[in-house]
Amino acid sequence: MEMDEDVGIRIYTATPPNEPSSSSPQLDSAVAAGHPSGGRKRRAVAKGMQKTLSRTSMLVNFLPTGTLLTFEMLLPSASGKGECTAVNTMMINVLLGLCTLSCFMFHFTDSFKGGDGKVYYGMVTPRGLAVFKSGLAEVEVPKDERFKVGFTDFVHALMSVMVFMAIALSDHRVTNCLFPGHAADMEEVMESFPLMVGTICSGLFLVFPNTRYGIGCMAN
């Protein structure tokens, strides 16, 4: 019984060896003959997105869940059409400030499971956990030392702010409005800044392990 030669397993790579790459003379001449500006623009956008994802993919684990998602959802509205007017710049600054405050404050929250099986959240203070929900006469709030604010909480909060700023500044919509005319300089800085932040934060998390299960944190 004869078998079809086309049946088999094929392994695809990012750049097949037998196909011309995007930098080949044939493809460049074809783009130049058609829509050179449109082709260059699409390649530049795709390259920029790929760089941003590769730089920041390892950093999102340091952020409270939802903060980065909220930033990415609201940034298109704040940046408008990329014209960077005074209003757009102000909205981006407000968005950065709110998200930075969120990253900082959420690292001072913790939770515990009460006798009724429900999970309660609160803010850690020097005196212990201040539960958000009032009227908990029937639920005993734990008085353990781990629910008191400490030096580690400030370290994690500052690291979270650094990570968020590294991710936010990797977006050209932010840097083009906040640092107009310095696109080349920001591109050079952001080549290494996210990697440096990720390396430093990874080392600090080994020294100061996280024991909080607050808002935006997943418990084990």
Image (cartoon, grey):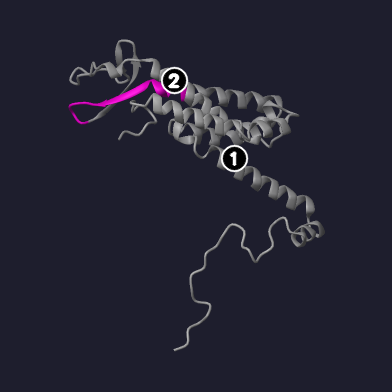
Asked if disc 1 and disc 2 are in contact, CB closer than 8 Å, the reply is no
**Does residue 36 show up magenta in the picture?**
no
In the rendered structure, the answer to whether residue 91 lies left or right of residue 39 reads left
Identified by mark 1, the residue type is Thr
Q: Nearer the viewer, residue 207 or 159?
A: 207
Disc 1 crowd rating (10 Å Cα; few below 14, some 14-19, many 20+) is many
Image quarter of residue 152: top left
Q: In the rendering, at what x and y percent does residue 110 appear? A: 33, 23
Nearer the observer, disc 1 or disc 2?
2
| Mark 1 or 2, nearer chain start | 1
Q: Which residue is mark 2?
A: 155
SS category of the residue bearing label 2 = helix
Say the numbered circle drawn on residue 200: none
Identified by mark 2, the residue type is Val
Say the numbered circle drawn on residue 52: 1
Image quarter of residue 51: top right
